Image: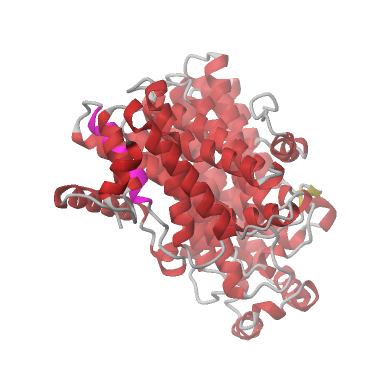
Amino acid sequence: MTDIIRAEHPVLEDASVQLLRAGGKRIRPVFVLLSGKFGTYELPRIQTVAVTLELIHMASLVHDDVIDDAELRRGKPTVKAKWDNKVAMYAGDYIFARSLEYLSNLKEPRAHQILSQTIVELCIGEVEQIRDKYRIEQHVKDYLRRIRRKTAILIAASSRIGAIASGAPLAYERALYRYGYYVGMSYQIIDDVLDFTASEADLGKPAGGDLLQGNMTLPALLACEDDAFRERLMKAFRDPEQLNQEKLQPFIQHIKSSDAIERSLAMSDRYLQKAYQELDKLPPTRDRNTLKQIARHIGKRSS
Amino acid sequence: MIVLSYASMEELHTLRKKIENRMQQAYLDENLDIPYVDDYKLLLLQTLFGQANLPDKQQTDYIVTIMLIQIALDTHDLVIRKTKADETADERVDRQLTVLAGTYYSALYYKILAELEDIDMVALLATAIKEINEQKMVLYYDTASAAEFFHILRRMESTLFYAAASPFIKTKELEPLVDYFIISRLNQEAFMNEPTPITIRLGIILEQNQSTLTVTEAINQELEEASARLTRNLRTMPQVYAAAARKLLLQGKRQEELYLEEG
């Protein structure tokens, strides 16, 4: 991947590989590679898709850090913190363009149609996330629609495009898409739970960041079923500029001690069960087993 | 205001509407200014694809796509270098949506071409976007003089068009047109009431060089020089492009004046 995003301008090159060096879970390429096993597995083709999907994800993270004004990601300074917002914008755009250029080696229009539609929806999901910030009066359905666009569909697309690139049968392609979708939903719910429960060291950034940004994630929404808590949070959200980590501590503590975390994890688990059901539609191979183990790991992860 | 016949005006208006319709997103529209659509770039793209013997839909899709890329690139330029420590809630939303709007427009370009199943054009334009971001880094971080700044700007403004044109015409034939893009861009800059990324950066360079010129004077000087070069080159470019270039040059000029300059 480092070779693919090599740039002529030294700062652009450093900025582009900054996030790559910080590591990551690389779940999207893993899903591409494994999904590719359900058709005719040609490594160069599948690899092209796997690398592209990770690069697109990376480009979006570089821009997300400008949106969130984030100083740290995965425990390392963000591109915008190390250089500035403009460098982050250009590096993100550069990586995105490079990934499309690279994926154009795959002459499968359907793969491009799915991916481009996914990226459009991903953007809309992020716009809606900003629209819904500090909005307490929203339904769990709003949250699910948001994370569908924000996370699940890119993971689903990774699995599906991996299947398309290997020419897997349509039934497998559909099952893999739905598997990726359900795993993605579960993954994001757990991410949102961990934002409350994990330590700063594990997260690589301060805990409770979502609430501080006004993002109403599932644990916060479920905790808001308690009228007194909802009233207090609504009052705090009225003046977002006055909010800080310290002022939010009582809210974070309340969410942690309520049943909101447990109920969120239960919902995540329901998505995982659905993901397992999709895997039953695939042939019983070692790769299917690996996909099952990944889903199980996601359900248990603590960082 | 662009100097065109009624029919051409209508066509440009229709194209502009199509671009605006494609970009529509309720929350972005509610919160951000309408992006600037450069009529002269639109005119040139219309000329290019009109000559290419393409079906009408493909022509329109190509034009819309390229303009979306231009708007996406320009939108991301609007993101401020450092987030203000005392940023207000409105300023924060503006910054965040500006990032997303640029990415959204860029994603639309990919979607349109994917629907056309035109993967080669995806690649061609992606290469151009990559190059433009390299050029932006040089423009905003490395340029040391106004001359260098305008030189990079000229290249940057023409990269996308030349990439799009390359499958249809020998790019060499269009080389005399290179100043068209910087003129169009600088006209746009002169039209803005507020400082833009271009004028801010140029201002810094002029100050560093202890220049006696103001930003407006430097832009006007470059506009004059670029217009003179483009006028000299009119006879060396294909007729249809020369016609488009004349329309650009005619802005604020009497026709006979231009004919005199062309000799």
Residue placed farthest to the right in the image?
Answer: A201
Residue B218 rendering spot, x and y as whole percentages: 57, 53
Residue A180 location, x and y as percent? 52, 39
Q: Is residue B46 magenta?
A: yes
Q: Nearer the viewer, residue A165 or B131?
A: B131
Q: How many marks?
A: 0
Q: Is residue A230 above or below residue A108?
A: below
Tell me which residue sits at (61%, 60%) in the image.
B214
Q: Is residue A140 above or below residue A301?
A: below
Give x and y (percent) for residue A275.
52, 41
The answer to whether residue B135 is visible is: yes
Q: Nearer the viewer, residue B258 or B157?
A: B258
Q: Quarter of the image holding residue A24?
A: top right
**Residue A300 lies within the magenta run:** no
Quadrant occupied by the N terminus of chain A: top right
Report whether A14 appears left or right of B17.
Answer: right
Most frequent secondary structure within the magenta stretch: helix
The magenta stretch is B38-51
Residue B71 screen position, x and y as percent:
44, 49
Left or right: B72 as drawn, with respect to A254: left
Q: Nearer the viewer, residue A35 or B148?
A: B148
